[in-house]
Image: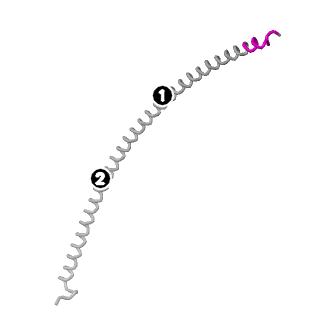
Amino acid sequence: MLEVTEAQVWTMIGVFTTLMLGTLTIIATLFVRVLRSEIGSVRGEIGSVRGEIGSVRGEIGSEIASVRREIGSFRSEMNARFEAVDARFDSVNSRIDGLDRDVQALVKHTFGLDRG
């Protein structure tokens, strides 16, 4: 039977330890490579998402600008219509004033208030 004090036993222990550490080193190196590769692909995906967000942001900006232009034209149209309604009210008001003057003249003439 071999004892722990013999040279072959210590050689086998050294070879086994070297194999285990080599295997551990290879696995760690491959893991780091895979991790770097995956991180790189995630960065690429994030870059593409940023690009998509930028394009969506541009589309939303153009839509907002379009809505603002439509609101501006609607505001101008409504202001023009309000001015037209104001002009009609002024016309009706002047007609009512003329009608009031005519009715007062008729009342004065009919009831003799203008004869003094």
The answer to whether 4 appears left or right of 78 in the picture is left
Residue type at tag 1? Ser
User: How was this image coloured?
Assistant: one colour
Q: CA distance from mark 2 to mark 1?
A: 48 Å
- Indicate yes or no whether the magenta region holds residue 94: no
User: Considering depth in this image, is 59 or 114 the residue closer to the camera?
Assistant: 114
Q: Secondary structure at mark 1?
A: helix
Along the viewing direction, whichever of 79 and 105 lies nearer the viewer: 105
* x then y, percent, for residue 15: 20, 76
Tag count = 2
Q: Nearer the viewer, residue 26 or 104?
A: 104
Left or right, 93 with reference to 80: right
Q: Nearer the viewer, mark 2 or mark 1?
A: 1
Q: Is residue 109 above or below residue 34?
A: above
Please identify the residue farthest to the right as the structure is shown. 116
For badge 2, the amino acid type reads Ser
For disc 2, the marked residue is: 41
Q: Residue furthest bottom?
A: 1
- Contact, mark 2 vs mark 1 (Cβ under 8 Å): no
Which residue position holds label 1? 73
Of helix, strand and loop, which mostly describes the magenta segment? helix
Question: How packed is label 1: few (under 14 Cα within 10 Å), some, or many (20 or more)?
Answer: few
